[in-house]
Image (cartoon, helix red, strand yellow):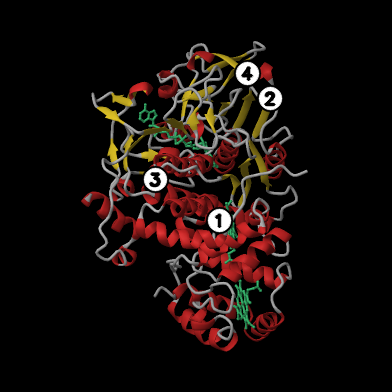
Amino acid sequence: MKPDYHQYWQPTVFIIGLIFSTLSGNSSAATSDNSNIRLLAGGCNICHGPDGISSGPAIPSIAGLSGEYLRSTLEGFKSGEIPSTSMGRIVKAYNSDELQALAAHYSGRPFINARQPYNPKQAKRGEKLHEQYCEKCHARGGQSVDDDAGRLAGQWRPYLIWALKDFRSGQRIAGKKMQQRLDKLYIRKGKAGFSALLHYYASQKQ
Amino acid sequence: MTITRRRFIKTLGAASALSLGGTPFLALGANRQIVIIGGGIGGTTAARQIRLIDPTIDVTLIEPKQHYYTCFMSNEVLCGKRKLSSIRFDYTGLKALDINVIHDKATHITPNRQKITTKGGKTLSYDRCIIAPGIDFKWESIDGFDEKTARIFPHAWQAGQQTEILQKQLGSMPNGGTVIITPPSGPMRAPHAPYERASQIAHYLKQHKSRSKVLIFDAKIAFPQQALFFQAWEKLFGYGTHSSLIEWYGGPDYALIRLDTASHTIITVAGDRHTGDILNIIPAQQAGHIAATAGLTDTSGWCPVDLHTFESTQHKGIHIIGDACIANPMQKLGSAANSQAKACAAAVTSLLNGRAPGPAVFTDVAYSTMGEAYTFSTVGTYRLAKGSNSLTRVAGGSTPSDASATHLKREAAYAESWFNNLTKDTFG
Ligand SMILES: Cc1cc2nc3c(=O)[nH]c(=O)nc-3n(C[C@H](O)[C@H](O)[C@H](O)COP(=O)(O)OP(=O)(O)OC[C@H]3O[C@@H](n4cnc5c(N)ncnc54)[C@H](O)[C@@H]3O)c2cc1C
């Protein structure tokens, strides 16, 4: 028998609670639910930064990503389908409802672009490649998260490099269509093509 | 009332503040007071989190120092990879949140009158008090060693000046010199860190003084992530061979009982004498002094608490977080102090608002850097079983021993990020 831990979670109550608690200050049930998500997300922020905005240089920001992308990525870490250095060890502590609540929480926080150096010429070249190969699902130059794909624009560069390496090596499985685009880009433009793309994503600062 | 309204606006940010419209804010009469003793990782996190959860509560933080130096990443200062200034933080972030920071030392707590007195002569009242005083050393456990002697034989287990002393000693040690590290027995801050330190020092010696050695005389028979450390030492420093840069001797016989300052010699329980150019003596530890003064410690020297709220089981109204409290099997780590502070902040605000505290999840994280692009980690996630006062590690673990070079390299960059994010989450 598994011991009974405090881990029951009702995402809807939390979201309503968050709105009311911040507005009315004293609505009793509401504020306690607000602190519930704080407690759940508190451990994540130790590594990902306050409200999921990472100061870098490598751990990704997780605020403002799509809720569905966050949920499925967290489940992917849990099952081992998505390779990781540490996430796989961490997410096992949370049940699916909790991962869903965390996904909802972080997707509702604003994303802030990472400030990192880039080469403007390379970035220009990357922009063209992005439009040709990636814009379809990573819209608005990789800023959009509407297609439940990860965020590319303004994400920390080392993290993106490693995600792309894992896709290339087959350790992380991309959707069939994305894999085709990655392969095509690699065959036609090689490493330099990817490098240009990464300069473009780093260049986006809004 | 205007103060709390201004805090609301600061806390919510301009956009959400607009939506408050003209709604008058209802104050609950006199503001409630939370006083926090200790502006380290635990205390600073608690102050910030309370402010974010309930801006109507007045928060005061008492901390003697103007600057805080993190212990984590201080080993990286020793080998020259980091500057001391990169681990220095201050309290401007807290002050910006309208938290009252008093640079003073708490000398006394009177639990039944809910009052704190300070060295500077102030008296403060509280509705709830949180103390996060970190650790104190059991100086008496080593004959010939005390706070003054530690300026020549640094522990560097509280960062800042102590880190600087040890770093300077390493810099001026001749090639061929010996560094001795003596980890203590009993519960301690960052139990993995003496071995990370040995690695960082060996990394420095390998580049600059390769005929030198690090000798560890350890009161413990085993230590955390031992297999991962040994593996790294074999790969990087020739561990197990005659020319190894690191040698480790562990067990009760190796415990340090006496220091001969004149001859730079340590004397162990077994009576062996070892002489070194640098003696990094890490004494046995207990909760920060104020905890004992206030009657919050038990015979172990640490503070028993109700883990749902971190309230002392010995005095109502006082909560203890961070290294000073007993929260096994969580480690005494900065990440743990941050995590406990969040749970405590939620509990204390709930209690002051007449509500039951919500369920908490705890996380601790330790990264150990061995050399260039070689870092491994341990993480733990903990929960309270319902109806009990004990924590269970529900997930976590260390970097696998067969991790690839790529993995270890990634963790090196993730460790830097973790440092930046944890300190941002704590100090702002
Ligand atoms: C070498 C080393 C490596 C480490 N590595 C890691 C790591 O990888 N990961 C990790 O998470 N942790 C690590 N740690 C541990 C971490 O530094 C501590 O666990 C953490 O600092 C504990 O936080 P705290 O708030 O309990 O105490 P502290 O951060 O020490 O803060 C205590 C504060 O209280 C103040 N204080 C004390 N008494 C009083 C008083 N009477 N009145 C007012 N103020 C007072 C002190 O001035 C101090 O600022 C490491 C530690 C060391 C030494």
Extreme residue in the left direction: B2
Counting residues from the N terminus, which is met first, the one under dot 4 or under dot 1?
A: 4
Q: Which residue is mark 1?
A: B413
Q: Secondary structure at mark 2?
A: strand
B182 relative to B293 in the view: left or right: right
Residue type at mark 2 is Gly
Which numbered disc covers residue B50? Answer: 3
Q: Nearer the viewer, residue A183 or A92?
A: A92
Marks 3 & 2, CB-CB < 8 Å contact: no
Does mark 3's beta carbon lie closer than 8 Å to ligand 1? no
Q: Quadrant of residue B179?
A: top right
Counting residues from the N terminus, which is met first, the one under dot 2 or under dot 4?
A: 2
Q: Give a yes or no on whether discs 4 and 3 share a subunit.
A: yes
Between the residue at mark 3 and the residue at mark 2, the CA separation in whole angstroms equals 43 Å
Marks 2 & 4, CB-CB < 8 Å contact: no
Which numbered disc covers residue A80? Answer: none
Q: Chain of mark 3?
A: B
Counting residues from the N terminus, which is met first, the one under dot 2 or under dot 1?
A: 2
Q: Which residue is mark 4?
A: B255
Q: Secondary structure at mark 1?
A: helix
Q: Which residue is mark 2?
A: B250
Q: Nearer the viewer, residue B166 or A129?
A: A129
Closest to the camera, between mark 1 and mark 3, is: 3
- Residue B235 percent coordinates (x, y): 70, 45
Between the residue at mark 4 and the residue at mark 1, the CA separation in whole angstroms equals 36 Å
Q: Give a yes or no on whether discs 4 and 1 share a subunit.
A: yes
Between the residue at mark 2 and the residue at mark 1, the CA separation in whole angstroms equals 32 Å
Q: Nearer the viewer, residue B11 or B402?
A: B11
